[in-house]
Image (spheres, grey):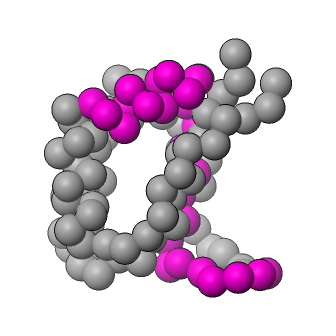
């Protein structure tokens, strides 16, 4: 079964409130075995539009990634994120 990745590209409008999103989402990440591969580090744009913050999170499967996203814990966190940031959020299945 291939792994799955959350890829988020975000511009944060309220950094203080965004910290609450990070804390609120932590139980969901732990519950579903999320592994942060990139989390807001240095970037260099080679093509296209950019966002200030880029995050890549690995999950064991698409099922785990979707379950985490739809979990009660992350649903609460998502509401916070959406109210204080703009961006794109996709799931990508890896190759075996």
Q: Residue at x 38, y 26 (%)?
A: 67
Q: Residue at x 43, y 70 (%)?
A: 87
Q: Is residue 14 above or below residue 37?
A: below
Judge from the rendering whether residue 44 lies leftward or rightward of residue 41; answer left or right.
Answer: right
Q: Is residue 26 above or below residue 40?
A: above
- In magenta segment, residue 52: yes
Residue most extreme to the top: 1
- In magenta segment, residue 36: no
- Please indicate, yes or no, whether residue 77 appears anywhere in the rendered image: yes
Percent of width and height locating residue 40: 51, 66
Q: Quadrant of residue 83?
A: bottom left
Front residue (pair 66, 57): 66
The C terminus: image quadrant: top right
Q: Residue at x 80, y 32 (%)?
A: 95
Q: Quadrant of residue 62?
A: top right
Percent of width and height locating residue 14: 24, 78
Q: Is residue 46 above or below residue 32?
A: below
Front residue (pair 67, 53): 67
Q: Is residue 49 above or below residue 75?
A: below
Front residue (pair 43, 94): 94
Q: Quadrant of residue 58?
A: top right
Judge from the rendering whether residue 89 lies leftward or rightward of residue 84; answer left or right.
Answer: right
Percent of width and height locating residue 85: 32, 72
Where are the magenta residues, as a range? 46-71
Judge from the rendering whether residue 17 lies leftward or rightward of residue 92; answer left or right.
Answer: left
């Amino acid at each position: 079964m291939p792994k799955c990745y959350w890829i988020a590209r975000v511009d944060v409008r309220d950094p203080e409130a965004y910290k609450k999103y990070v804390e609120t989402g932590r139980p969901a990440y732990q519950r579903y075995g999320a592994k942060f591969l990139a989390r807001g580090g240095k970037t260099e744009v080679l093509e296209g539009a950019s966002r200030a913050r880029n995050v890549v999170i690995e999950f064991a499967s698409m099922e785990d990634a979707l379950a985490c996203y739809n979990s009660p814990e992350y649903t609460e966190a998502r509401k916070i994120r959406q109210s204080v940031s703009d961006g794109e959020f996709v799931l990508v299945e890896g190759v075996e």
